[in-house]
Image (cartoon, rainbow, N blue to C red):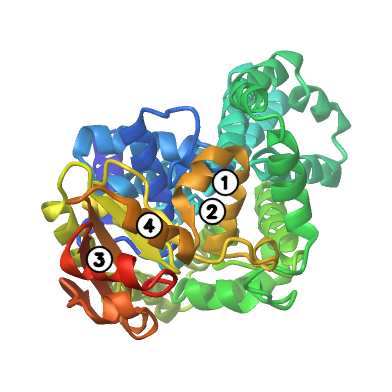
C-alpha cells in the first residue's frame, strides 16, 4: 500500500512538474482561464462570461474548477492548469486501479507509466482547456461501467460502480456536453453486444443510476434555459449537432488524420503497437479486457474522424485504452522471455518518452513567450480606477486576467460584417455571446466611429489603454501622433487621456478622422 501511494505521488509530481513556468498559450488557455477569472471576479458562478457576456460554447465544469483553483492558489498559470493536471492524475490512477484488479499489479504499473509518459497525454495534462478534463471523466466513466458489468458477471453487486458511472457521466456532460455520455455509452454497449451478453443491459439501464445521472447533469442546463430562452437551441442544436456535421469551421482534415497523429504523439510507445497486429495477442484468453480497450480506442478515433474539422485534443480520451493495450504487449514480451533485447527496450522507452515530454514542454514554453504576457501585467500595474481597456481589431484573451482588469474590454471591429457568423474565430465567439446580453454587447463591441465618439465625449482625465498592433499607428492618425507606452513584438499599447491637447485637436477639428 505504501509503495502504491508513493507511485501515485510520483505520478502527480511528474504531471504537475513545471506547469507554472509557461505563460498561458493563446488563444485556448487564455480563453478558458480568462472565462474562469471573469466568473470569479464578477461572482457570476453559474453563467460563464466572455468579456462580460454569457459564453455558452462549452459547459461550466472546467470554469468552476479553475475558479476554485484561483481562489486557493491565486490567479496564475499553475492554478489555471491545475484542473487538467488533476484530471490527468485521476485518469492514470483510475486506469491503474482497474487494471490491478482485473489483471495484476505489474500490468497496472506499466499501463499507468505508459499513459503518464505519453507525450500526447503529458502535454494535455499541462494545458488549461477542456480536453483533459473530459478525457479523464470519459475514462473513469468507462472504467466504472466496465467494472460494474464485470462484477455482475461474477455474481457481485454492481450498484456502487453503476452509481459512480452515473455521476461521472453527468460530470462529463458538464465538462463538454453530450459526448460525455454518448462516448462511454457507445463503448460499453458495443462491448456488451460483442460478447452477446444482453442481460448486461439491465445493469447499464438501472433506474437509480439514470436518476443520479439526471440529478448531476440536468440542473445547470435547465437553469440556463430559464434565464436564456435561446440556450437549448444554441447549445444543443447548434454547438453539439450542427457544428459536428458542418464543414465550414477551422482545422479541416482528412478522415485518416488521427492515425498519424496518434502514432507520432505517442512515440516512443507507439513503436510497441506492432505487437497489436499479432493473431496470438488477440487469441489469448483475457476476460474480454483487450476487446473492451480496442472498442474504446476505435470508438473515439472513429467518432472524431467523422466531422471535417479535427483538433488534436479531441482524441485524448483514447489514450488510456491505447496505453493498456501497449502495456499488454510489453508484459506479453516480458513473460515470454523472447529476446532480452526487447525486454531492455522498456526502460529505454521510459527514458525516451520522458525526454520527449520535457522537450515538448520546452517547445511550448518557447512558443508561449510570443504571447505578450508582460504587456498585460505591466498595464495591470498602471491601471487606475475608472481606466478603460480598448482592443483594436483583436481580442487579447489573456489581457483581463493578467491585468486583473475590473471591467470588460471595449473591442473595436466591424461588428456589422455579415461574414462574422460564418467564420469560426474570436469575432464569432463575442458576436454569439452578445446575442444573450445585447445591452452588454452594445457596451463592449464598438465600431471605429463609436469609439471615437466615446473618446471625444469622455470627461477630462478619463484614461484609455489602447491595445493593438504596430500597424494600427499607420492606419489611425491619432495613434500615429502618439508614442506607444508599451511594446513587445508587434503588439503596442497606447495611453489616451481624454481632454489632452491631441484629443481636443482631434475632436474639435476632424469630425470623422483620427480613430476612424
Q: Which residue is mark 2?
A: 430
Ranked by sequence position, the earlier of labels 3 and 4 is: 4
In front here: 377 or 27?
A: 377
Image position, residue 74 (x, y; %): 20, 40
Residue at screen point 66% across, 58% down: 297
Viewer-nearest of labels 3 and 4? 3
Q: Disc 3 versus disc 4: distance between alpha carbons? A: 33 Å
Quarter occupied by the C terminus: bottom left
Q: Please report whichever mark, 3 or 1, sits nearer to the chain's N-terminal start.
A: 1
Q: Please state which of residues 32 and 336 is positioned toward the viewer in this rendering.
A: 32
For image coordinates 68% across by 77% down, the residue present is: 253
Rounded to the nearest angstrom, the CA distance separating label 4 from label 1 is 17 Å
Depicted 177 relative to depicted 18: above or below:
above
Helix, strand or loop for disc 2: helix
What residue lies at 73% left-to-right and 57% top-to-bottom? 243
**x, y percentage for residue 358?**
28, 71
Q: Please tell me the numbered disc located at residue 433.
A: 1
In the image, residue 201 sits, relative to residue 431, either above or below, namely above
Amino acid at each position: 500500500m505504501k509503495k502504491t501511494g508513493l507511485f501515485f505521488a510520483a505520478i502527480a509530481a511528474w504531471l504537475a512538474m513545471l506547469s507554472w513556468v509557461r505563460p498561458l498559450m493563446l488563444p485556448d488557455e487564455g480563453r478558458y482561464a480568462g472565462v474562469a477569472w471573469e466568473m470569479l471576479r464578477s461572482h457570476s458562478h453559474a453563467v460563464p462570461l466572455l468579456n462580460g457576456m454569457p459564453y455558452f460554447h462549452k459547459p461550466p465544469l472546467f470554469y468552476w474548477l479553475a475558479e476554485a483553483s484561483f481562489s486557493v492558489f491565486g490567479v496564475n498559470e499553475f492554478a489555471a492548469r491545475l484542473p487538467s493536471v488533476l484530471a490527468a492524475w485521476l485518469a492514470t490512477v483510475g486506469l491503474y486501479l482497474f487494471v490491478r484488479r482485473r489483471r495484476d499489479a505489474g500490468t497496472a504499473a506499466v499501463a499507468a507509466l505508459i499513459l503518464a509518459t505519453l507525450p500526447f497525454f503529458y502535454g494535455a495534462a499541462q494545458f488549461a482547456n477542456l480536453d483533459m478534463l473530459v478525457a479523464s471523466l470519459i475514462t473513469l466513466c468507462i472504467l466504472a461501467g466496465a467494472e460494474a458489468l464485470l462484477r455482475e458477471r461474477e455474481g457481485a453487486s454492481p450498484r456502487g460502480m453503476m452509481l459512480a458511472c452515473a455521476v461521472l457521466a453527468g460530470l462529463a456532460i458538464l465538462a463538454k456536453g453530450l459526448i460525455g455520455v454518448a462516448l462511454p455509452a457507445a463503448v460499453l454497449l458495443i462491448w456488451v453486444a460483442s460478447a452477446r451478453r444482453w442481460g448486461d443491459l439491465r445493469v447499464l439501464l438501472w433506474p437509480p443510476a439514470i436518476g443520479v445521472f439526471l440529478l448531476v447533469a440536468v440542473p445547470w442546463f435547465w437553469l440556463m434555459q430559464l434565464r436564456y430562452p435561446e440556450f437549448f437551441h444554441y447549445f444543443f442544436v447548434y454547438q453539439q449537432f450542427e457544428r459536428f456535421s458542418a464543414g465550414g469551421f477551422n482545422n479541416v482534415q482528412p478522415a485518416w488524420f488521427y492515425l498519424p497523429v496518434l502514432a507520432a504523439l505517442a512515440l516512443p510507445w507507439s513503436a510497441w503497437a506492432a505487437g497489436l497486429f499479432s493473431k496470438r495477442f488477440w487469441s489469448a484468453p483475457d476476460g474480454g479486457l483487450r476487446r473492451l480497450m480496442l472498442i474504446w480506442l476505435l470508438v473515439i478515433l472513429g467518432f472524431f474522424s467523422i466531422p471535417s474539422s479535427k483538433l488534436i485534443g479531441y482524441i485524448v480520451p483514447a489514450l488510456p485504452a491505447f496505453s493498456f493495450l501497449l502495456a499488454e504487449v510489453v508484459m506479453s514480451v516480458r513473460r515470454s522471455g523472447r529476446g532480452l533485447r526487447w525486454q531492455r527496450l522498456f526502460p529505454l522507452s521510459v527514458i525516451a518518452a520522458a525526454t520527449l515530454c520535457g522537450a515538448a514542454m520546452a517547445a511550448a514554453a518557447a512558443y508561449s513567450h510570443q504571447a505578450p504576457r508582460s504587456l498585460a501585467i505591466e498595464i495591470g500595474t498602471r491601471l487606475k480606477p475608472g481606466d478603460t481597456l480598448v482592443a483594436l481589431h483583436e481580442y487579447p484573451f489573456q489581457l483581463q486576467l493578467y491585468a486583473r482588469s475590473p471591467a470588460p474590454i471595449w473591442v473595436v471591429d466591424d461588428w456589422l460584417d455579415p461574414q462574422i457568423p460564418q467564420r469560426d474565430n474570436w469575432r464569432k465567439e463575442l458576436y454569439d455571446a452578445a446575442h444573450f446580453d445585447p445591452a452588454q454587447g452594445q457596451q463592449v463591441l464598438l465600431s471605429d466611429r463609436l469609439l471615437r465618439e466615446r473618446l471625444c465625449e469622455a470627461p477630462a482625465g478619463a484614461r484609455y489603454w489602447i491595445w493593438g498592433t504596430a500597424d494600427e499607428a499607420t492606419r489611425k492618425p491619432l495613434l500615429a501622433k502618439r508614442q506607444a507606452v508599451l511594446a513587445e513584438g508587434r503588439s503596442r499599447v497606447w495611453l489616451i487621456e481624454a481632454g489632452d491637447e491631441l484629443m481636443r485637436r482631434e475632436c474639435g477639428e476632424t469630425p470623422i478622422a483620427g480613430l476612424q
